[in-house]
């Protein structure tokens, strides 16, 4: 049902992008800040930043938690996060098999990491398992329609799949149901980022480690000719401002057991 994920390749790719991540992660910063604003106003004992990336949100999360754990599948990202020195622990682990005790976390915060999982139900089940009975899990993830301009532009170039599949909202709802998590808050927001040209779009995805699709399929080399066709196809989206839009549909949720 879900795409196979080569987790080592994924971890390496994010690791390679660890140093450039903060400079290019404009959407991720916007989304993470929105997610922070949804944290229920309480004091939390143990907190977890799941898929913490470069640790951009650790300083904020530190304000909410007595003991903050930063977890990511990429050691490269974790090393970058550790430079901030805002968490009490740094753990390399997989969201689908969390190396944490059951009912150990009062706050789980996970921003734009879960869409990389092979089996989202399993990831949400793991979140439920580690959550305390009074705890909250906050997530933000991409849904269907994200990057639609780039997906459509690629269809003019070749038959490969260049963009990951993102869950439709009803599918995400049923994933949460299957994981037996209750939803306290639910929001969907459209974020549109703007770039001068296709090169800047591709570069920004690469520099945050998000340039490849899950799965085994080879996408082939991006030759000059292919790039030209991609640029031509994307032109139909150019705005009167002269910029190219990149749309992201983001689902935000506050969950509890
Ligand atoms: C787009 S970044 C988001 C990072 C950070 N949460 C932020 O908002 O800036 C996605 C992160 O999720 C991590 N990730 C992807 N799949 C994961 C998994 N199965 N378990 C843990 N981390 C994962 C990646 O290594 C990467 O650091």
Image: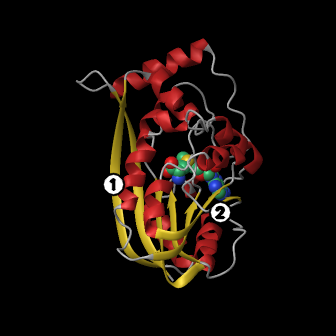
| Left or right: where 215 falls relative to 40 | right
Q: Residue furthest top?
A: 224
Q: Position of residue 186 (x, y in %)?
A: 36, 69
What's the residue at 49%, 21% (across, down)? 199
At horizontal 61% and vertical 62% (from top left) the residue drawn is 88
- Please state the horizontal and vertical placement of residue 178, each as a whole percent of the image: 57, 77
Do the residues bearing badges 2 and 1 touch, measured as CB atoms within 8 Å?
no
Ligand 1 closer than 8 Å to label 1 CB: no
**Does any atom of ligand 1 lie closer than 8 Å to the CB of label 2?**
yes
- Which numbered tag is attached to residue 189? 1
Q: Residue furthest left?
A: 240
Residue drawn at 42 percent across, 53 percent down: 32
User: Quick check: 176 left or right of 5?
Assistant: left
Is residue 25 something that shows in the picture? yes
> Which quarter of the image is occupied by the N terminus?
bottom right
Residue 95, which numbered label? 2
Of 227 and 103, the residue lying toward us = 103
Q: How many marks?
A: 2
């Amino acid at each position: 049902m879900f795409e196979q994920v080569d987790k080592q390749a994924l971890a390496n790719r994010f690791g390679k992008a660890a140093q450039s991540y903060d400079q290019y992660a404009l959407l991720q910063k916007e989304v993470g800040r929105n997610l922070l604003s949804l944290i229920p106003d309480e004091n939390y004992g143990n907190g977890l930043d799941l898929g913490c990336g470069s640790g951009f949100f650790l300083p904020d999360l530190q304000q909410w938690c007595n003991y903050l754990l930063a977890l990511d599948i990429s050691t490269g990202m974790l090393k970058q996060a550790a430079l901030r020195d805002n968490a009490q622990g740094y753990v390399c682990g997989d969201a689908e098999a969390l190396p944490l005790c059951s009912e150990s976390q009062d706050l789980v915060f996970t921003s734009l990491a879960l869409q990389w999982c092979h089996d989202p139900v399993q990831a949400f089940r793991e979140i439920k398992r580690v959550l305390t009975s009074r705890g909250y899990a906050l997530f933000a993830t991409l849904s269907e329609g994200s990057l639609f301009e780039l997906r459509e532009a690629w269809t003019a170039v070749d038959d490969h799949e260049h963009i990951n599949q993102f869950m439709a909202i009803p599918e995400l709802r049923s994933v949460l149901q299957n994981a037996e998590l209750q939803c306290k808050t639910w929001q969907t927001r459209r974020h549109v980022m703007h770039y001068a040209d296709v090169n800047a779009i591709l570069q920004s995805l690469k520099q945050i480690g998000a340039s490849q699709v899950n799965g085994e399929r080879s996408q082939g080399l991006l030759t000059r000719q292919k790039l030209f066709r991609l640029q031509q196809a994307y032109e139909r989206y150019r705005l009167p401002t002269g910029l190219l839009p990149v749309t992201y549909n983001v689902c935000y949720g506050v969950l509890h057991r």
